[in-house]
Amino acid sequence: MRNLTRMLLVSTILIGCVGCDQISKQVVRNQMTLAESHSYLSDTVRLIYVENTGAFLGLGDSLPESVRIAFLQGAVGVIVLGLLWAAAFARDMKRWQIVALALLAAGGLGNLIDRVLYDGRVTDFLNLGLGNLRTGIFNIADVVEVMGVLLFLLAFRSGEPTNRRPAGPVR
């Protein structure tokens, strides 16, 4: 893939995903009060405004604030930069691999922006389920990250193995 095409692809994914994430969170912060909940489609979709100081499903929420900040802002920032670098410059990558890395970076950046701007808190608001079987509360950045992970796994699994000999007898 040509460098300009690759940069446009990564930039489009980054701007589109982070933009949708940040706009949706801003709408929730402006239109709902903390812990307010709305139910749609026979309670299949719930909008619930919460602020998450931990990682996925509140993981790490009870860590001391300095450790939480170092990990969820510092380490995540480094990881996002690494993912962006790989998506933009790593050689011998197929288009779907680049898209997967860009999605992972975009999801991480969307939540990192919240952590930096809102005192370590990420706005979450989506909850899906049927009856008592429900997801945790999440946001668009989380969806983008899951899409990136799934695409990453599919893209790298379906790719041609490199530097491997065909199976057969050893001579």
Image (tube, helix red, strand yellow):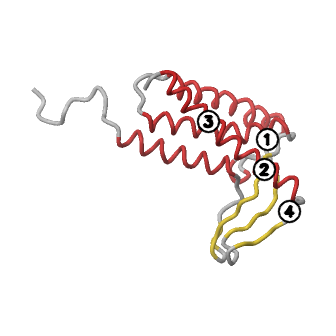
Q: Residue at x 79, y 63 (%)?
A: 48
- The residue pinned by badge 4 equals 35
Q: Position of residue 155 (x, y in %)?
A: 42, 41
Which label lies toward us, 2 or 1?
A: 2
Whichever of callouts 4 and 1 sits on the residue coming sooner in the sequence is 4
**Identity, as a three-letter code, of the amino acid under mark 1:** Asp
In the image, is residue 18 above or below residue 1?
Answer: below
Q: Amino acid at mark 3?
A: Ala
Query: Label 2 belongs to which residue?
Result: 25
Whichever of labels 3 and 2 marks the residue nearer the N terminus, that label is: 2
- Pointer 3 local density, CA inside 10 Å: few below 14, some 14–19, many at least 20: many
Q: Name the amino acid, label 4.
A: Ala
Residue position marked by numbered label 1 in the rendering: 114
What residue is drawn where x is 70% and y is 30%?
A: 77
Q: Residue at x 44, y 34 (%)?
A: 95
For discs 2 and 4, the disc positioned in front in the rendered view: 2
Q: Secondary structure at mark 3?
A: helix
In this picture, residue 84 sits left or right of residue 121: left
Between 52 and 32, the residue placed more toward the observer is: 32
